[in-house]
Image: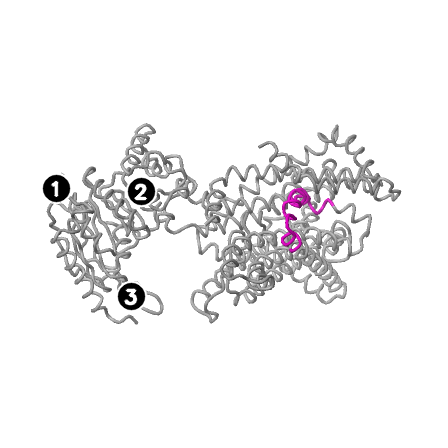
Amino acid sequence: MAAGHEVVGAGRSAAPTATALDAQAIVRWLGGAAGVLVLAALWEAAPRVGLINRNFFPPLSVVLQQLATLVTTAEFWGFVASTARTWALGLVIATVAGIVAGLFIGLVPEARTYTHSTIEFLRPIPSVALIPGVILLFGSRYQSGVVLITYAAFWQVLLQMLYGLNDIDSVARDTSRSFRFSRLGFIRHVAWPTLLPFLFTGVRLAAAMALVLAVTAEMVIGSQGIGRGIVVAQASNATPEAYAYVLVAGLMGVAINMAARVLERHLLKWHPSVRNAGGP
Amino acid sequence: MIAAFLRKLAVELALPLILLTLLYLLSASSTNFYFPPLSAVLEKFNALWLGKRFFSDVIPSFQRLMAGYLLACLLGVVLGILIGSHAALRRAVEPVLEFFRAIPPVAMIPLLIMSMGFGDAMKITIIVAGAIWPILLNTVEGVKGVDSVLDETCRTYQIKGMARLWHFILPAASPHIVVGMRLGLSIGIVLMVISEMFAALDGLGSAIIYFQRSYEIPQMWSGVLMLGLFGFALSMAFRLFERLVLGWYYGMRNLERRD
Amino acid sequence: MDDLAPVVSVDHLNKVYESKERRVEAIGDLSFDVRHGDFTCIVGPSGAGKTTLLKCLSGLLAPTRGSIRVNGHEVTSPPEEMAIVFQEYGRSLFPWKTVRENVELPLRERGIAKDKRRAMVDAALDAVALSDAGNSYPWQLSGGMQQRVAIARAVAYQPKVMVLDEPFAAVDAQTRADLEDLMLRLWSELDLTVIFVTHDIDEAVYLGQRVLVLSSSPTRILDDVRVDIPGPRTQAQTRIEPEFAALRTRVYRGIQAAKASKAPQG
């Protein structure tokens, strides 16, 4: 089953036809900004007014202040870099492995039927099941996180590749026969363009998941990174600092998502046949 | 007929059996403390998880998961319908949701422990906090994209209010919602385990980490195996649910695909 | 009931679409009445605002000026006494409901008791010759059958007015002929009042007692043709009657004139 919050229809490029500012876009932007402002106001007011316990939930301004201080420290950037490295490594390995496995399963005849049950069994195994094993192998070094991310992200990419391959089947039936493609021509004109949106959806979803897992690994296993920052701050009762790190994690996630969307829109803009990616 | 069925079964089981046998044989002579022979793990599995521990650990984990997951489904769908039905609300709320959804729920665990303690309430809260996002966002997506002709049909035939919700909006959005629920389930399981690893007296997660800390390695791996089966069983159960709710959808798609 | 009072009364209907770039007057000035038991066809060139008229009639769109009255009440939202059969039959039937459930749904909402509902649904499916398809899903049926389900649903609803929006446009010619005859049969058997929008001139003259020819936008009524063809309407006979040809030509000329006088669009 496809993953991600934009499933039936994921990969369909809803690129705006006019990039110039127009009334509709401004309204939409304002609406979004209003929402963020309301949230910020609530976060600021609720603890101060006493709706929420100040000790557990410091006001936004306090957290932002803490963040401003953090940003000047080398340790903070060390954490960010560590998390980013773990994230990137895991994602890249998972993507390559996913593409290779996907191509293998798609191109080798009968491979799909034979691997189907194994995939269906391994898929639902939560990545956290690997945590004990990974601790034993790597301790709290960053490789632990990389293994966790690679495992989970691999399935995302592979699954999307398999959906894409399914789609190729139906497209191939229709087009190849009428055009009589050579093997290479088939790959260039049919297989690759059909696979691309699916692959991109897989990578996008994997990227989001990879960040979550990187932070998780750091928190649970204790490797260097933002997750560790949260745990250490909370342990020493520096609550605003802990929240500051959580904020950073959230912002990184948002940034990754936005970057992925922009990239997707750009890469698939010229794409002649953008199909619905994903789907059961 | 039976021959065809047996043949299909053989194909399905071929690779898994080969892999399992390989694993069994390769690990049989293992003297590595951290990676004991598969036989040892299976023995511990039998002793621990098919017996008392199933009730003292697996069941509580399952109960926590279900409490959090079902709550997440309810909240996610209700809020999703509300947000998806009102364009203005959706515009205002979307960036906020994008931000919240990007926060790793795990990050909230230490903070929740501070305010809620180590009990079940904390674990259920974290499960809800993580599992709700794909459900909510997918519901919004599903509600947003309902067919305009069907909407006009409802209007002209006086199908309004709760009836419209029940007969039109919910079923129309259900393919999206179900996918969101599937993702939410995966996230819920992960959070269940992690929250138990952090702070629990019982549960799968806490058992695994306990074994790991006391260096009872075969027991630890047996716990991991149990966790894998747990996830697998839930996945199968979900499949059944999906087939029930989306039978019409798959039928329709199959027909379309054939064209 | 006063048989002479019109069931539908369109009074100086005017509809203007305003967007930031342009202002389109889809409907200029439309006035006509439909009396109980009439079969009124509406034809016009494409862009003649047929869809707009339909949406205003059915209360899905509010007029800019003028009014529409159904059964004496002004239309501000979809009127209860009206049933619509849409052109896109595939999209107007609920794919998660069986044929029977689809036809039944509006009746359920009316609060009609279960047994009576069952009887009404049976009768409607019978009338469109789909008694066997009750437990199938719409997407399992052919296009023509799906449209018949939509018609059955409208019929079961027992509306005062049935409005059809180019219902047979997306169906093959042979099926269309069958569906046209089905409509005629239902109209006479059930004493329906029908407003039938189409772009097919032959169909309009074949089915209707009266054909309203619309101009291009801003739409007005170009011609109001009384269809007086002797004898019962049959595919084989009616279409070769000289009156049919004459009326058809008259309508055709009207539409050509409408197209020619079409104001250049900005």
Q: Chain of mark 1?
A: C
Using the image, determine if residue A210 lies above or below residue B33: below
Q: Chain of mark 3?
A: C
Q: CA distance from mark 3 to mark 1?
A: 38 Å
Residue at the image position 20 percent from the left and 49 percent from the top: C69
Amino acid at circle 3: Val
Of helix, strand and loop, which one carries label 2? helix
- Tell me which corner region of the image, top left, top right, bottom left or bottom right, holds residue C80: top left
Q: Chain of mark 2?
A: C
Q: For residue A121: magenta?
A: yes
Q: Nearer the viewer, mark 2 or mark 1?
A: 2
The disc at residue A246 is none
Q: Nearer the viewer, residue A51 or C249?
A: C249
Q: For residue A170: magenta?
A: no
Q: Position of residue A180 (x, y in %)?
A: 53, 61
Name the residue beneath numbered marker 3: C24
Q: Position of residue A253 (x, y in %)?
A: 63, 58
Q: Are marks 2 and 1 in contact (CB under 8 Å)?
A: no
How packed mark 2 is, by other alpha carbons closer than 10 Å (few <14, some 14-19, many 20 or more), is many
Position of B83 with respect to A208 (left or right) is left
Q: Which residues are magenta?
A: A103-129
Q: Nearer the viewer, mark 3 or mark 2?
A: 2
Name the residue beneath numbered marker 2: C148
| Location of the N terminus of chain B (image quadrant) | top right
Name the residue beneath numbered marker 1: C3
